[in-house]
Image (tube, rainbow, N blue to C red):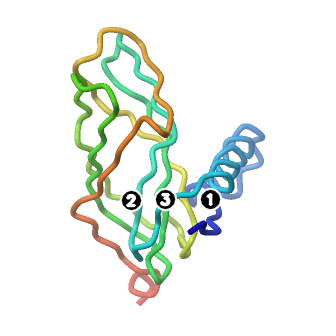
């Protein structure tokens, strides 16, 4: 089932007039509009959109979105992200995130928060780019602070 999801920037960037940010956000919105994501459980999801591995740094710059399908707005969250790709010998480090209210803002149900990560990687020998369809992601240890809890 297709869901109507709206892409949003991190709270501290939402008033930005920078054209590059607006273009990035529109690209993400186009992806959300064109892709049938399986989001049937009322929870948070992490969808990696692109990863660019730089062998000189042994890190991957990953652009992704955290989608709120939880029943209430979220203002703060902590979670662990486990990522895999179709490259069997590659290991992507586990990502532990704690995102405060000044980053998350008031993430409404059916909104997707754009985030960028820099993640250590082992097992690759040259630069490589990964697209969304090449990733599998799993969330663990999810802690959600609902907007009403943060205000009270």
Q: Residue drawn at (55%, 60%), measured in percent from left and top? A: 112
Query: Which quadrant of the rendered structure holds the C terminus?
Result: bottom left
Label ID, residue 8: 1
- Of tags 1 and 3, which is closer to the observer? 1
C-alpha separation, residue under disc 2 versus residue under disc 1: 15 Å
C-alpha separation, residue under disc 3 versus residue under disc 2: 6 Å
Label ID, residue 103: 3
Please tell me whether residue 6 is drawn above or below residue 83 in the rendered image: below
Task: Report the residue marked by disc 2.
Answer: 99
Residue projecting furthest to the bottom? 152
Looking at the rendered structure, the secondary structure element under dot 1 is strand
> How crowded is the residue under tag 2: few (<14 C-alpha within 10 Å), some, or many (20+)?
some
**Could you tell me residue 111's position as x and y percent?**
58, 67
- Of tags 2 and 1, which is closer to the observer? 1
| Label pair 3/2, CB-CB below 8 angstroms | yes
Q: Residue drawn at (28%, 70%), measured in percent from left and top? A: 143
| Label pair 2/1, CB-CB below 8 angstroms | no
**Could you tell me residue 85's position as x and y percent?**
34, 34
Asked whether, in this view, residue 16 is left or right of residue 114, the answer is: right
Of the residues under marks 1 and 3, which one precedes in the sequence? 1
Q: Residue drawn at (63%, 58%), measured in percent from left and top? A: 7
Of the residues under marks 2 and 1, which one precedes in the sequence? 1
Q: Residue drawn at (53%, 67%), measured in percent from left and top? A: 105
Looking at the rendered structure, the secondary structure element under dot 2 is strand
Query: Which quadrant of the rendered structure holds the N terminus?
Result: bottom right
Label ID, residue 106: none
């Amino acid at each position: 089932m297709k869901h109507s999801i709206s892409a949003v920037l991190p709270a501290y960037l939402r008033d930005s007039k920078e054209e590059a940010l607006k273009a990035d956000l529109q690209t993400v919105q186009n992806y959300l509009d064109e892709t049938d994501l399986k989001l049937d459980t009322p929870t948070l999801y992490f969808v990696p959109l692109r990863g660019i591995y730089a062998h000189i740094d042994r890190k991957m710059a990953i652009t992704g979105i955290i989608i709120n399908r939880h029943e209430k707005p979220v203002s703060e969250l902590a979670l662990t992200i486990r990522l895999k790709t179709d490259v069997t010998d590659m290991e992507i480090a586990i990502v532990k995130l704690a995102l405060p209210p000044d980053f998350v803002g008031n993430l409404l149900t059916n909104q997707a928060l754009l985030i960028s990560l820099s993640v250590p990687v082992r097992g690759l020998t040259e630069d490589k780019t990964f697209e969304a369809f090449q990733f599998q992601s799993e969330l663990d240890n999810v802690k959600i602070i609902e907007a009403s809890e943060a205000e009270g």
